[in-house]
Amino acid sequence: MLTIVKDYWTNFVHLFFPHTCMGCNADIMPEQFLCTECLMQLPRTGFFEAADNPVEQSFYGRVAIDAAAAAFYFTKQSLVQQLLFQLKYKGRQDVGIWLGQQIGHQLNISKRFQPIDAIIPLPLHPKKEKLRGYNQSTCIAKGIAEVLQKPVYTNVIVRNKYTHTQTQKNRVQRWENMNDAFTIIEPEILKQQNILLVDDVITTGATLEACSNALLSVPVASVQIATVAYTLL
């Protein structure tokens, strides 16, 4: 009897609030983004449990972070790219929160990312944030915070250098492009805090490196990095 009632309720909800999986367009409940099959097919990296993973290696000899990882691999025309496209260009901030929750669950079981005192989303330049209407990294950070029950700091560091896309730049050009791009405006709040720095995608890590160096100048106790996706050049 309970099953019948549940089925009727599900059909009723779908009738007035149709919702489909972002991966395969299958009919799903409104609070979901992916069906079970597409969720299982997301290309997880396993980096949160792996020391010396490729994300951490990208920072070797450049900045003294304690740990770094990405939840998923990023490839063109993939479901991960589609989710991030919805987040960044279609106003789907809820997708960012959901992706952050996925990271939060992985952080929860990882012994390599402890302790974490506060979460900082990688800042956007004010001009770019105004054009988009929000910072996609803040959405991700909020999702992580919901799982970890940690504060999100959005006004302690600013991006004072407007940079154009780094897609066509090599590693050296990307580093030069980000030189002195960030300024700490609330150093007292950050002192001796274990910071989790959050972004959507990492390629060379030049932007995250510049932001980490700014945070370490405070000095904070440690900087750890978590992103939704990792892509190869």
Image: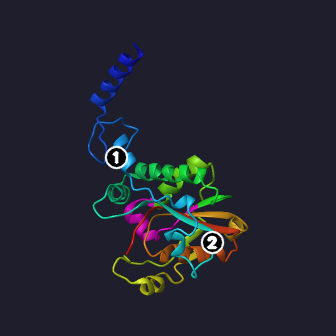
Q: Residue at x 36, y 35 (%)?
A: 29
Q: Position of residue 134 (x, y in %)?
A: 44, 59
**Residue 35, position in %: x, y?**
35, 41
Instruction: Kindly identify the residue that appears in the image at 51 percent across and 54 percent down.
Output: 103
Q: Residue at x 35, y 76 (%)?
A: 167
Q: Check disc 2 and report the residue beneath it.
A: 185
Helix, strand or loop for disc 1: helix
Q: Residue at x 30, y 25 (%)?
A: 11
Total labels: the figure holds 2
Q: Is residue 198 magenta?
A: no
Label 2 crowd (10 A; few <14 / some 14-19 / many >=20): few
Which quadrant would the N terminus be assigned to in this image? top left
Residue on which the image places disc 1: 38
In the rendered view, how is the structure colored?
Answer: rainbow
Tell me the amino acid under the disc marked 1: Cys
**Front position among marks 1 and 2:** 1
Mark 1 and mark 2: Cα distance apart in space: 42 Å
Q: Which residues fall within the magenta stretch?
A: 120-136
Look at the picture and state if 47 lies above or below 167: above
Q: Residue flagged by tag 2: what amino acid is it?
A: Ile
The correct choice, above or below, for 64 with respect to 107 in the image is below
Q: Is residue 91 left or right of residue 152?
A: left
Query: Residue 53 versus residue 154: which sits nearer the camera?
Result: 53
Look at the image and tell me in which quarter the C terminus lies: bottom left
Is 36 displayed left or right of 216 in the figure? left
Q: Position of residue 182 (x, y in %)?
A: 55, 76
